[in-house]
Image (tube, rainbow, N blue to C red):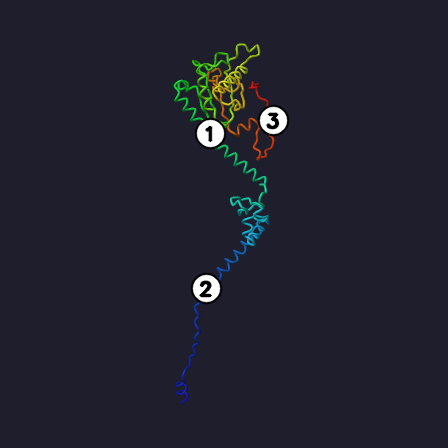
């Protein structure tokens, strides 16, 4: 009986069911991204505050306290120091800033302004030289008398300005042999060049050159130095007579054979020439020692002694 009762006893199995996790999505990722972004913005703000000068901070503070007043009147904090942010004041193009109305620019600003003036003058000179070169070339090509001597007239742009070289030819010399007397066709050439230079604002430099053939009476003290200077001065007289103002002549100099055009043949006729240089403003300042009033430059060392030359009195 006991065995049958044991067989009839039910077997109870307990099963524990764990509750399923509630779906929460990716909201935590958004919160974490916002936190990282806020921290990055905070450290960026700290870095900007640490690298910004006191003048910039004061300018920003003044602007947000009274923006209309600072924008219209400027002020000590309206960009008084150099900054990547444009300075305050009436002139919104200023990047260095303005402190008060009527204040003068700082030395750095004056130097920058002087450099800009030099660039503007250089561009203006380059344009004038190009126009003058085209004008003289047209005069030579249109005049039958000058067209025959076009190969003896050389126009060259140099760092000092437009250089007009009238080169001698074995069959057509510009001057009488050993003399400063101008040939008739040389007179016609200088007449046209003088007319072209009548209305220019730039100064002119005149240089006379000879070849290395010794002057016949050099033993009496008159040499190629005096001959080249006399020819340069004769050229000056012809240009002035043609209409070029005499006060535009900055220098008349004889260089003899010190600057040869044909170095391989020192006695070549091409070395006997007259150089007329219409100088740029920079070359004129360098020659005459004139400096712009708003640019402070250190004094230049004295120039080394040059070869003897005879200049226009």
The circle on residue 270 is none
Above or below, 295 against 72 in this view is: above
Quarter of the image that includes the N terminus: bottom left
- From mark 3 to mark 1, how far is it between C-alphas? 31 Å
Name the residue that disc number 1 marks: 128
Residue 181 location, x and y as percent? 49, 13
Residue 22 location, x and y as percent? 44, 70
Residue 70 location, x and y as percent? 56, 50
Q: Earlier in the sequence, mark 1 or mark 2?
A: 2
Residue 208 location, x and y as percent? 51, 18
SS for dot 3:
loop
Q: Earlier in the sequence, mark 3 or mark 1?
A: 1
Quarter of the image that includes the C terminus: top right
Name the residue that disc number 2 marks: 27
SS for dot 2:
helix
Above or below, 193 against 72 in this view is: above
Name the residue that disc number 3 marks: 302
């Amino acid at each position: 009986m006991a065995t049958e009762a044991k067989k009839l006893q039910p077997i109870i199995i307990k099963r524990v069911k764990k509750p399923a996790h509630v779906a929460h999505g990716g909201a935590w990722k958004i919160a974490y991204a916002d936190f990282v972004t806020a921290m990055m913005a905070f450290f960026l703000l700290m870095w900007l505050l640490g690298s910004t000068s006191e003048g910039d901070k004061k300018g920003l503070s003044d602007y947000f306290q009274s923006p209309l007043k600072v924008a219209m009147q400027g002020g000590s904090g309206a960009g008084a120091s150099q900054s990547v942010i444009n300075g305050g004041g009436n002139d919104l193009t200023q990047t260095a800033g303005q402190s008060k109305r009527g204040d003068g620019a700082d030395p750095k600003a004056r130097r920058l302004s002087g450099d800009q003036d030099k660039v503007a003058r250089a561009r203006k000179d380059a344009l004038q030289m190009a126009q003058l070169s085209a004008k003289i070339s047209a005069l030579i090509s249109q005049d039958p008398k000058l067209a025959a001597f076009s190969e003896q007239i050389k126009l060259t742009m140099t760092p000092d300005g437009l250089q007009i070289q009238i080169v001698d030819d074995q069959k057509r010399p510009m001057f009488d042999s050993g003399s400063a007397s101008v040939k008739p066709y040389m007179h016609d050439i200088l007449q046209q060049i003088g007319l072209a230079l009548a209305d220019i604002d730039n100064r002119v430099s005149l240089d006379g050159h000879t070849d290395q053939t010794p002057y016949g009476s050099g033993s009496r003290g008159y040499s190629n130095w005096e001959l080249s200077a006399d020819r340069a001065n004769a050229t000056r007289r012809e240009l002035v007579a043609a209409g070029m103002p005499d006060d535009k002549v900055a220098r008349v100099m004889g260089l003899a054979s010190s600057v040869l055009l044909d170095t391989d043949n020192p006695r070549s006729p091409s070395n006997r020439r007259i150089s007329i240089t219409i100088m740029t403003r920079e070359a004129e300042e360098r020659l005459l020692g004139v400096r712009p009033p708003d640019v402070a430059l250190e004094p230049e060392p004295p120039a080394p002694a040059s070869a003897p030359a005879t200049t226009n009195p």
